[in-house]
Amino acid sequence: MKDPEQPVKPVHNEAGIALILVLLVVGALSALLLDLNYTTRVNLHLAENFRDQTRASFLARGTLEAAIALLLEDENFDFDDPESPEDAIWATPNVHEEEGGTIRIQLAIHDEDGKISINDTKNLFLKDSTRSTQLPPLAQNIKYVLALEDTVMDSIQDWIDSDDEVFNFGAENDYYQSLQPPYEIRNGKLWDLTELCQIQGINDTIYFGGTEEFPVGLSGIFTDIGGDDKKRKINVNTAPYEVLAALGDPAFADEVESLRPIESLTDLKGLNDYGTLPKNIREMLDVKSAYFSVDAKVKVNRIVKSVHAVLKRDPNNDSVNIVYWREE
Ligand SMILES: [Ca+2]
Ligand SMILES: [Ca+2]
């Protein structure tokens, strides 16, 4: 039996405390390591993104320089022949891949002088629609050639003219304010051709074309470059047939199409149907182009950079200059 007088011996369980301490330390270290691992991976990811962003940005700018070089390689500045690979080396879209597909570069150069300037308020649309109930002949021809509803050209007229009077089947600000969501009419020149898609009566089919009903869309015949620039011409060698047909009699379009490339203004003036064109249209024509748009797209891993630029070629001093440049 235990002696009740004998003092109780205290129990020491230090091994258990040490285990708890070790577990706490291991737990804290694990949390630290996990945090370090996460932070390191995030920083690595950020660094990779920064590296790819920088590479893509410089490659996109380099692609624009390549576009300038391609335009300067054109063997003939006097007239354009898009069918000839030597003359229009720039007309072939370029796709370049390297480093096992991690870098992809796309470059497309478009001739803008084969199109009609949407902002031409001298020949195409009226500055003020209250002064006439009819669109200028060029706009009426486009409506006829593309088989557009009256709404389309009338609404573009109202979008561009500065007044608030509705032109025939057009629409002014009241209409656009009644939409959900509402937006403001431009009542001035278009900043960008894609703005056409905001206008009453214009949908993707009419804008892009490529369907049986609309083989050529508005984007194929209009450009936002040029405006009222009197020096800006339409190149009959690169214009789509629809543009040529809209300029005057379809017989002129047929003649130009069968004889292209037209090598000089003298040759152009010598065509049988040239004389049938109105004076203001004759003054708009040329056989060479000055304005080109460039779309460059660069993909480096998951980073994509796009550059849209407008270049102007000057045949007098064999130079190409950047008129407009936008990087996204
Ligand atoms: Ca208006
Ligand atoms: Ca109007």
Image: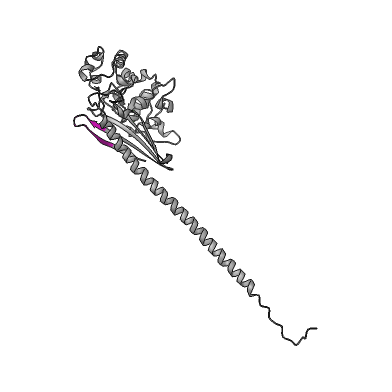
Taking the view exactly as shown, the residue that stands out farthest to the front is: 100
Q: Residue at x 32, y 17 (%)?
A: 245
Counting from the top left corner in percent of width and height, residue 77 is at: 23, 27
Side of 96 where 77 appears, left or right? left
In magenta, the rendered stretch is: 312-323
Where is the N terminus found, in terms of image quarters?
A: bottom right
* Magenta-colored segment: predominant secondary structure: strand
Q: Residue at x 19, y 30 (%)?
A: 316
**Which scheme is used to colour this image of the protein?**
one colour
Against 220, residue 2 (above or below) is below
Against 310, residue 247 (above or below) is above
Counting from the top left corner in percent of width and height, residue 272 is at: 25, 11
Q: Residue at x 25, y 20 (%)?
A: 281
Q: Nearer the viewer, residue 193 or 64?
A: 64
Q: Nearer the viewer, residue 63 or 158?
A: 63
**Which quarter of the figure has residue 261?**
top left
Counting from the top left corner in percent of width and height, residue 203 is at: 43, 27
Q: Nearer the viewer, residue 328 or 11?
A: 11
Taking the view exactly as shown, the residue that stands out farthest to the left is: 316
Against 3, residue 59 (above or below) is above
The mark tally for this picture is 0
Q: Nearer the viewer, residue 163 or 264?
A: 264
Counting from the top left corner in percent of width and height, residue 204 is at: 43, 28
